[in-house]
Image (cartoon, rainbow, N blue to C red):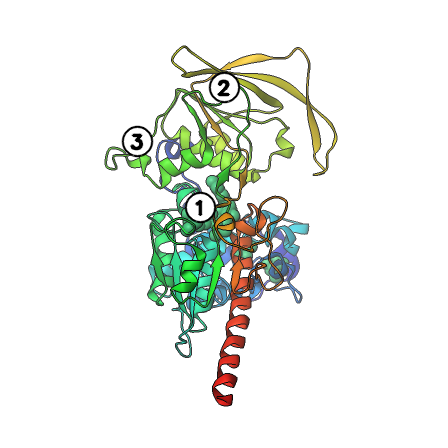
Amino acid sequence: MALSKKEKFKIKRTEMPLRPSEVRNKDFMEVPIGYEDVEAVVESSRCLDCKNPPCVKGCPVGIDIPKFLEKVYEKDMQAAINVIMEKTQLPAICGRVCPQDEQCELVCVVGKKNKPVAIGNLERYVADYARYHNLLPKITFEKELDQKVAIIGSGPAGLTAAAELRKKGYQITIFEALHKAGGVLFYGIPRFRLPGDVIDAEIKAVTDAGVKIVLNTLIGRTLTIEQLFEQGFDAIMIGTGAGLPKMLGIEGENYKGIFSANEFLTRVNLMRADRFPEFITPVVMGKKVVVIGAGNTAMDAARTALRFSPESVTVVYRRSREEAPARTEEIEHAEQEGVQFKFLTNPIKFIGDDNYNLVGMEVVDMELGEPDASGRRRPKPIEGTNRVIETDMVVQSLGFGVNPLISSTTEGIELTKWGSIKVDEDGMTSRDAIFAAGDIITGGSTVIMAMGQAKTAAKGIDKYLSQRRQEAQQDSVIS
Ligand code: FAD
Ligand code: SF4
Ligand code: SF4
């Protein structure tokens, strides 16, 4: 018998089961365990099947959430994955790393009286079920077109644009600077949040459809954009992300033992320092590790450092816990695992010994003043509170800027004042036939936002190339 709305509102949300913190903080295996079949069905039963579902508007790629939840409730996983994959090519990834609490789940109607429906957990459940049971729908298209599109960067933006354009029949080649595809999904987000086999499987679905990925090719150095056009590409999409780390710029920043979060995470995730000596690329680890910043990247760096068993890992942040940009869940997971936090604390300078090894960091206590331009209360130092924190390793995690390599080696690409690439409503840059999407246009956002922009750019490229085909046909008729 169908449940009434009132009854549905009363069902408790099934929280994601996690591995015990004292076990998981010593290895790199995935922290969440995933739903059992029965848990997924119960959780899906909480959906009210709203007429104008706000959750769908809250999802940057517009997944028909009530429809897929209904299919989970009916235990029809083939239909559930088909509904999800009408809108996303990376469902197991999105189900794991999307900031759902700020997107689809934030606006879920059930959330007004109870906790929202666990949309992300259910998306992950369906995607994993479909992968294990070979139910993932394949990319199909009506006919092969001979127009060629080059995509620069194999992160979520590049992969999404590639899949969308392949569905139209275009010939797609992705050029990737690194030796492994996936962008931040692979080199930034740690394996205990996003396992490698999950990423590889979703990339394989794209290459199985005929998309080529050329690795170890840095566009702007190995090949320029102009050379790609000379090679016969009809359109190009730049999806190179925002991988340029920001540093504090304070005294002593060159002492040994000071890393950017990007460098540290890349050494562990991409160079596989987590599996040293199987992989001969270790990372230098300190005993008293300090991570500066409190965003998701900082939490990833702190939790990664913890897994190498140092004496302590401390996150230092100049604002209060309430202002910390990381997802609440990420901060909670870090705390459960043993990461310590020093809020309202600002680094002033790094201190080294005679051999240029980091031995400490001078900090000052902060208090919150009036709100600044971002609406957050501006932190200001409290006089006379300077002190030294003992540390032999610091990971700076202060956000990212965009790498100027492509814009500086390509004529006519206009930038914003922050250095990101300007695009129009079709995702086209100021240069004809060159499009851009993802962090390179926002300067650092989320996986699903990058994917949403990539879909816009793919539509723009299709529109542009369709016009070129029509013009070519008209020309051939005239001549
Ligand atoms: P990227 O993922 O950065 O991919 C760009 C690709 O382009 C890279 O592979 C790069 O090697 C390649 N490239 C760069 N320059 C060139 C060139 N010149 N030639 C060829 N290739 C090039 N978002 C979430 O939604 N949830 C999270 O939990 C989350 N956690 C994060 C954790 C960390 C540590 C970081 C750094 C970011 C996190 N983000 C998260 C943000 C998210 O990963 C990004 O917003 C997203 O990956 C952007 O996708 P993209 O495709 O634009 O760029
Ligand atoms: Fe929510 Fe992300 Fe899934 Fe969209 S892709 S429904 S925002 S979890
Ligand atoms: Fe279901 Fe919540 Fe979406 Fe309504 S808003 S359709 S209850 S998931």
Q: x, y percentage for residue 424? A: 62, 60
Query: Quick one: label 1, few (<14), some, or many (20+) residues within 10 Å?
Result: many
Q: Which of the labelled discs sits on residue 282, or is there none? A: 3
Q: x, y percentage for residue 295? A: 55, 36
Q: Is residue 287 left or right of residue 297?
A: left
Residue at image position (25%, 37%) is 279
Q: Nearer the viewer, residue 199 or 122?
A: 199
The disc labelled 2 sits on which kind of residue?
Answer: Gly
The answer to whether mark 2 is within 8 Å of ligand 1 is: no
Residues at marks 2 and 3, CA–CA distance in whole angstroms = 25 Å
Residue at image position (33%, 65%) is 208
Q: Is residue 448 left or right of residue 190?
A: right
User: In front: mark 2 or mark 1?
Assistant: 2
The disc labelled 3 sits on which kind of residue?
Answer: Pro
The secondary structure type at the circle numbered 1 is helix
The answer to whether mark 1 is within 8 Å of ligand 1 is: yes
Q: Which of the labelled discs sits on residue 252, or is there none? A: 2
Compare marks 3 and 1 and give the one earlier in the sequence: 1
Question: On the image, numbered disc 1 is attached to which residue?
Answer: 184
